[in-house]
Image: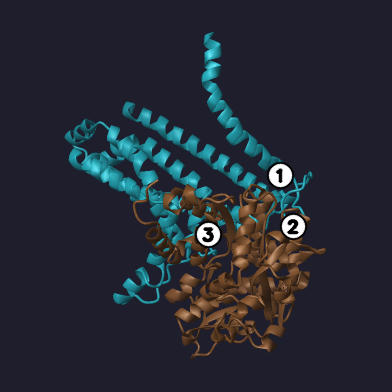
Amino acid sequence: MTQRARNWLLIAPAGAWLIVMLVLPLSVVFIFSFGERAPAGGYVPAFTFEQYANLPARFTAFKNTLILAPLGTLAALLIAYPLAYQLAVRTSERWKTLLLVLVIVPFWTSILIRSYAWIFLLGGGGIPALLDMFGIENVRLIYTPFAVLIGIVYGYLPLMVFPIYVALERLDKRLLEASADLGAHPMTTFFSVTLPMSISGIATGCMLVFILLMGEFLIPALLGGGKVFFVGNALVDLFLQSRNWAFGSAVAMMLIIIMLVTVTFYMRLISRLNIQRDDAPLM
Amino acid sequence: MKDHISKKKFMEEFRRYQKGSVTRRHFLGVTGLGAATAVLGNAMPGLRASPAMASDIGDRVVLATWPNYHDEANFDMFTDETGAFLQVNVFGSNEEMLAKLQAGGSGWDVYVPTNYTITTYVEEDLIEPLDLSKLPNYDPDAFDPRFSDAGIVDGVVYAVPKNWGTTGMAINTSHNGGAPFTSWKEFFDRTMDDFSGRTMVHDYQLTTIGAALNYHGYSFNSVDESELADAEKLLIDVKPHLFAISSDYQPAMRSGDAWLTICWTGDGKQLSTDIPDIAYALGKEGGELWSDYYAIPKGAPHMDAAYALINFMLDPEVNAREVLAHGYPVADSRTNELLPEEILNDPILYPAAELMDALEFGAAATLTDPNRAELLARFKSA
């Protein structure tokens, strides 16, 4: 067998997977998005831009997603970073494994069950009842955008913690000592050594969380009470309730386009930051 | 295979989980992940019939149905008698059921369509004509034709009656001086007033838009554009005052977070039995009268088991136990003879004639109308 044939053979499984699982379904969605809804629901072939023209009808869904997904990513980052820092830099080896396992433990139960638990925590008999005991009355948490944000941060926190942890773990601790020896304030050390060195972890974590959040539908459905509507919820409704596959496909195409644009933009930004970091020591 | 705990004990435990399963109904409803229940059933060897019991109908039957709609003890009895284990998929709306069947490969053997969907299923060729010789327990003369007619399309029996009921409202009367509301006008006006933040409407276009149409005095089934526009305006106005848009209203009504909701007969009965302050009421402007049916989808994988299950459920004694468990009335006179007087006189199950007269059966066009589907989506995303 030639080297060339071997290469093809090695790529074949991944290639087949990509074609069957990505290219084919996407092609179907693309084709459907130019079709029409059958009278009783479903799809009839056509060539029309009507579905795309109708996209403004889901403006609020796109707006909610484009506000809450970045906000959720940012909130998860702000909570995850100190946690990852503590784990990677400050915790002794003895405790590290145990604490890391504790971060993973929630993944042992389905996100569905855990989100459902939040319905009771945020419901009238949960946290609001507790606040009531301290004199803070009539707090409404469940079925609000805030509840959705809590659910998002809760659900996606581990995905943010791990990449940042890995980046900080690889950080050569002697650099921190050197920085201190040279008289840098701990804050200066953090902002000019630790943070730039962990940019790759932050970038990966944010990307993971953001992309998943853009397609999220479960958490808004459960904790938003049907009132906080994401693009994911619009899609579920279009395919599972109103059976408008053509319009659903157009909405899906739009979401993919938005993702491509934001992710490309984001990658550019990150690579610029990385270049700057590489330059930094020379200055 | 040796069970580690006795089969009976296991089933009791499992049923307890199912009874208290607040999660199931909602997550199945909102996610369409009905298969999750089936997976659970598969994953628990104790639930499968042992090979020794397996009869010629196979070892399983898959039922797609509505939440809180069966007596689990009947399922166990069916498994004991036939050796076929029941996989139950729970759905939130007829639209969702139709969507699943249109997409194909549902794997269901029996499903429970509502009256107005059956002609659509026939047109779409998604429903199997029934071979009545395999349903000896089905006696057409025993059924009130009002609630069995919709199962017959062009003289062919496609579906046999399960239960009927109404769509009204459940209200926690302790917030209204002990009295229920009597109209949809009150339902929406009070929601925008002292019930603000306490009301739920279904995540289902038929009933939620229907109620808003009733508020304006229009037909529950209207597909008239200007009437739908009025209904939409009301729904958009009322939205900031809603607690939630969800067909999973029992948990919130039980916890006291919600005070008022659009509600189906059996849920109303279950709620008011457990919490006497909660009353079930019909709007005097009208509302929905419906009947559900047992049917077999085209290409059901376990056809014999499907017939066996439907026939079993039509047995008057089995059916009577169902009614006692879920609180929905039946149209079968043989079953009614077995039911206690207080059930047959219960105003939740059998509302007063003048209230009933104002109700309408849902129409096929109401379900499939694209404008109504889109209206609800606009309302939810507003």
Chain letter for cyan, please. Answer: A
> In the image, which is nearer the foreground, mark 2 or mark 3?
3
Residue A238 sits above or below residue A35 on the image: below
Q: Would you say residue B167 is visible in this rendering?
A: no
Q: Chain of mark 3?
A: B
> Going 35% across and 73% down the picture, which residue do you hit?
A129
Disc 1: CA contacts within 10 A as few (<14), some (14-19) or many (>=20): many
Quadrant of the frame with the C terminus of chain A? top left
Amino acid type, residue under disc 3 in the picture: Glu
- Residue B257 at x, y percent in the picture: 45, 75
Residue A81 sits above or below residue A225 on the image: above
- Residue A161 at x, y percent in the picture: 35, 44
Disc 2: CA contacts within 10 A as few (<14), some (14-19) or many (>=20): some
Q: Which mark is residue B129?
A: 2
Q: Chain of mark 1?
A: A
Disc 2 + disc 1, Cβ < 8 Å: no
Q: How far separated are the C-alphas under marks 1 and 3?
A: 47 Å
- Residue A121 at x, y percent in the picture: 37, 65
Q: Secondary structure at mark 2?
A: loop
Q: Secondary structure at mark 1?
A: helix
Q: Would you say residue B74 is visible in this rendering?
A: yes
User: Chain B drawn in what color?
Assistant: brown
Q: How far separated are the C-alphas under marks 2 and 1?
A: 32 Å
Q: Are marks 2 and 1 on the same chain?
A: no
- Of the residues under marks 2 and 3, which one precedes in the sequence? 3
Observer-nearest of A194 and B357 = B357
Label 1, on which residue? A32
Q: Secondary structure at mark 3?
A: helix
Q: Which mark is residue B243?
A: none
Label 3, on which residue? B81
